[in-house]
Amino acid sequence: MRIVVVGLGAAGLWSAISARMKDSSADIYAFCDEKYFTYSRCGLPFVIGGEILRFNNLIITSEDILKRMRINFKLNCRVTDVVKDTVYYDSENGSGQLKFDSLILATGSKPFIPPIKGVNLTNVFTLRTIDDGAKILNALNSTKRSIIIGAGAIGLEVAEALTRRGLEVKIVELLPRVLPALLDEDMAKIVQKRLESNGVSLILGRGVDEIYGSGKVEGVAVGDENFQCDMVIVATGVRPNVDLAKNIGVNLGVTGGIKTSKLMETNIEGVFAAGDCAETVHLVNGKPFLPMLGTSAYRQGKVAGFNAAGGSRIFPGSLGSTVLKVFGVEIGSTGLTVERAVKEGFKVVVGKVRWYTKAEYYPTHEKINVKLVFDGESGRIIGGQIVGGEDVAQRVNLLAASIGWGMKVEDLCNIDTCYSPPVADTIEPIVRASELAFRKFKR
């Protein structure tokens, strides 16, 4: 059996590994259109900020590892077409073709670049690849003022990175708050204050109309105001890379990603998809969803690879669980925000608390803000947001597990939690927020 994987990001790598674990005798080939082995794109801002020394530190696999697993690979090689059971590709060594029994599309995503006049000027960057990051690093020596378009996770992480490098940083966001896909307005304001207290200027609820300059960027126009800068980072999100899928007749879903079954199989038998390019379902409302997360890419890749090798594993869907850290504050979200839940037709009950990560009298305790979203009809938890100084990630994981298991408000009130002054308070903040929500149900 021969399995071909197109893409060698997290989804592609784990597709190949999972296929090997399922079938020790299969011929497995992976094609990558970059010159690097699999690396963490999420780590790019931290190299720019100097927290991680080199981009090469982000590479998580190697030629030796792939060879030991008997995974054949081609770097700097682009798959141009698929006809029936044959992949056609172009590389620096010429073109070629390869027959397959199963095909996995793990083509990832690409930056979304808004149609802004001047976006092609010198020193206007996106950040998706190691090469993108290297270009930004090279430009820092001649940069004093920067503007970031977009206040999503990457935009905020890059803002901290550039601040660490001594640049003046301004963020322009079309929507009225930072992290609009992850946080409601009240939680976003906590993050906004942290950004501003660290010298980041925010222009919210307004878009960039033009990037101007003579060859090289000199500033941006936002409405009737001009803001001078030497560098612009376009961080307006990504879109699924589905060009190859469309060309070969693979169906796309309503999100623009490749439509897949729970087996991660497409409409074409024997053709699977995983990662940023693949549409799944949201575990709360069951609607089509594009998680665009490394964690989802890893899990989808394992399922796609196993099934491409003859298995029948299931990927149930995603909650979009996300965590990031900016200027010392940790930010996490899972499931639905209040805003999105209301749009989905839920009657919402909220439990919200400002609490402590350890005993209040313990010297290193941090403050933490927890907001839980419940379905007012069933009492089921459907979302959560946490902003605090520490220990956010594992609390988000707890909430994700709670949503996945269909836990209700009274279940969360009765979680048997642990306590010790240096590591946890007597009252777990998630439990306290649930108790406050439970009161509203009892009224």
Image (cartoon, grey):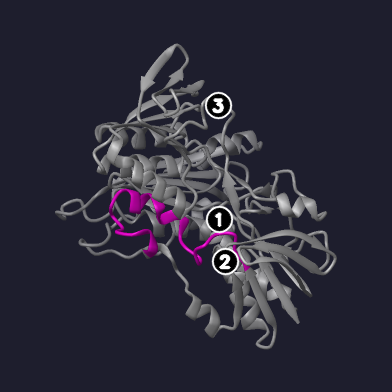
Q: Are marks 1 and 2 in contact (CB under 8 Å)?
A: no
Residue 341 is one of the magenta-drawn residues: no
Residue 18 versus residue 388: which sits nearer the camera?
18
Quarter of the figure that contains the N terminus: bottom right
Q: Are marks 2 and 3 in contact (CB under 8 Å)?
A: no
How busy is the neighbourhood of tag 2: few (under 14 within 10 Å), some, or many (20 plus)? some
- Residue at image x 47%, y 74%? 62
Q: Position of residue 342 (x, y in %)?
A: 60, 34
Q: Residue furthest top?
A: 224
Is residue 81 positioned above or below 214 on the image? below
SS category of the residue bearing label 1: helix
Which label number is shown at residue 116? 3
Label 1 or label 3, whichever comes before in sequence order: 3
The kind of residue tagged 3 is Ile
- Residue at image x 63%, y 70%? 30
SS category of the residue bearing label 3: loop
Label 2 or label 3, whichever comes before in sequence order: 2
Residue 313 versus residue 238: which sits nearer the camera?
238
Q: Which residue is mark 1?
A: 403
Give the CA distance from mark 1 to mark 2: 40 Å
Closer to viewer: mark 2 or mark 3: 2
Q: Residue furthest front?
A: 93
Does residue 402 appear to the left or right of 229 in the view shown?
Answer: right
Does residue 100 appear to the left or right of 322 in the view shown?
Answer: right
Which label number is shown at residue 75? 2
The kind of residue tagged 2 is Leu
Which stretch did the figure color magenta? 31-56
How busy is the neighbourhood of tag 3: few (under 14 within 10 Å), some, or many (20 plus)? few
Does residue 18 appear to the left or right of 180 in the view shown?
Answer: right
Q: Residue furthest right?
A: 84
- The answer to whether residue 113 is seen in the rendering is yes
